[in-house]
Image: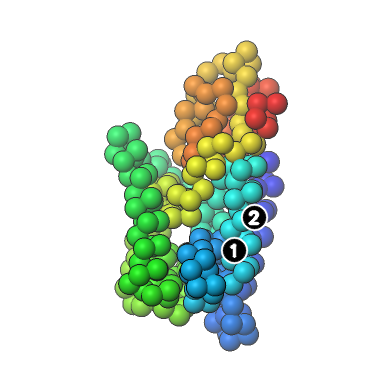
Amino acid sequence: MRVLRTLVQIAFLAGTVVLMARGIAGLTPNTCEAYCPFGGVAALLPLARYGQYTCRLTELNVSLMVSLFVLTIATKKSFCSWVCPFGTVSEWLSRAGRKVFGRSFHLPDRGDRWAMNLRYVVLVLVLLLTWTVWKGDLGFRAYDPFYILFTWGGHGTAAFSFYILFAILAAAVLVPFFWCRYLCPLGAVMDPLSRYGGLRVRRNPEACTECGECDRVCPHQIPVSREIEVTARNCTNCLDCVSECPESGALELSCYGK
């Protein structure tokens, strides 16, 4: 399963890089922004109030947003660990950091729980600024590491944008999924749906020896060994816990427990 997920990640990352290269070469006016489901969220209020899309957003962004919501209801945050190119880069940087430093670094439990709420603050700020101060323009481009990285200084970015990008990538080396866990506004939108997502990891207490291997490999610090079903909002169904579990039948995928 891990090999399959890596292949899927490579495919989506490669497609995004090709799109970036074509944009830089002037072969297409589209950027990764045209295929970003968060654009659908930003477009909702102007679309409802004025009947028009914000800036360069189109009906494709709204369609992708709806599709993502359906996917999240069905499979939790699998988009984050299987599809999202920035999530892939963050994951690979985290692995590199573990090899270099021999470990990953985590915030204390209380600080971690507090910091995870920052993404809701980012979500509200982005939407409010887009609909007010930025007057419908996508001013968040200058601060969005996904856009900065995969347009390499596209329209709306500035010199300071790269400092933001490099800081977030450096943080990902030390703290797994720093952006995704603490700051991503799309992750905040997905949280309520993910908690009730149908496809989830289920633990069989009769087969489980409580060795803790699943807890150790979970990139989101979910205590899998203490759960019957993993319903945590941060679970991305990366399935590392299933792959690393030494006991056959102890961990498996299920749909609402079936």
Q: Residue at x 56, y 36 (%)?
A: 196
Q: Are marks 2 and 1 in contact (CB under 8 Å)?
A: no
> Label 1's element?
helix
Q: Amino acid at mark 1?
A: Val
Q: Quadrant of the C terminus?
A: top right
Figure quadrant of residue 36? bottom right
Q: Amino acid at mark 2?
A: Ser
Count of numbered circles on the image:
2
Q: Position of residue 256 (x, y in %)?
A: 65, 30
Figure quadrant of residue 221? top left
Q: Quadrant of the N terminus?
A: top right
Q: Is residue 101 above or below residue 145?
A: above
Q: CA distance from mark 2 to mark 1?
A: 9 Å
Q: Position of residue 169 (x, y in %)?
A: 40, 59
Q: Which residue is mark 2?
A: 67
Q: Residues within 10 Å of mark 1 (few under 14, many from 20)?
A: many
* Apparent side of residue 96 relative to residue 85 in the rendered image (left or right): left
**Residue 207 bears which disc, if any?**
none
Q: Is residue 92 visible?
A: no
Front residue (pair 100, 12): 12
Q: Is residue 51 above or below residue 99?
A: below
Q: Which residue is mark 1?
A: 62
Front residue (pair 89, 154): 154
> Label 2's element?
helix
Q: Position of residue 136 (x, y in %)?
A: 43, 74
Q: Is residue 76 visible?
A: yes
* Apparent side of residue 58 relative to residue 249 in the rendered image (left or right): left
Q: Residue at x 40, y 56 (%)?
A: 123
Front residue (pair 23, 3): 23
Q: Residue at x 43, y 55 (%)?
A: 185
Q: Residues within 10 Å of mark 2 (few under 14, many from 20)?
A: few
